[in-house]
Image (cartoon, rainbow, N blue to C red):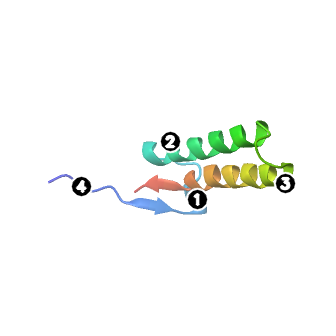
Amino acid sequence: MAKRKILKFGIFQYWKPTPLFLRKIGDTCLGVSAFLATTEIISPHKATAVLILGIAGKVLTNLFTHE
């Protein structure tokens, strides 16, 4: 029987490899937020908030790794 990989979350996991699925989610968060912030569809204050949330989402997904 194959051993299940367990996700670990923590500040010390930042430099370890991120699982592919979570890396795709983080890149998508950052890409969508950058697109919304640069296309002037929304107000400048909302664009700044969306960009900050996208960056935070990318950093948070980098804190996951497989055990």
Report the amino acid beneath label 1: Phe
Label 3 sits on a secondary structure element that is helix
Q: Residue at x 48, y 48 (%)?
A: 22
Using the image, tell me which numbered label, if any, was put on residue 24.
2
Where is residue 32 shown, x and y percent of the image? 63, 42
Distance (Cα) linking label 2 and label 4? 24 Å
Residue occupied by mark 1? 12
Disc assigned to residue 45: 3
In terms of sequence position, does the residue under pointer 3 or pointer 2 come before the other?
Answer: 2
Which mark's residue is nearer the viewer, 2 or 4?
A: 2
Q: Earlier in the sequence, mark 2 or mark 4?
A: 4
Spatial CA distance of label 2 from label 1 is 21 Å
Counting from the top left corner in percent of width and height, residue 9 is at: 51, 62
Residue drawn at (77%, 47%) of the image? 42
Between circles 2 and 1, the one closer to the viewer is: 2
In the rendered image, the vertical position of residue 60 relative to residue 20, given as above or below: below
> Is residue 33 in view from this perspective?
yes
Q: Which element type, helix, strand or loop, lies under badge 2?
A: helix
The answer to whether marks 1 and 4 mark residues whose Cβ atoms lie closer than 8 Å is no
Could you say which disc has been placed on residue 3 in the image? 4
Q: Nearer the viewer, residue 17 or 60?
A: 60
Sequence order check: which comes first, mark 3 or mark 4?
Answer: 4
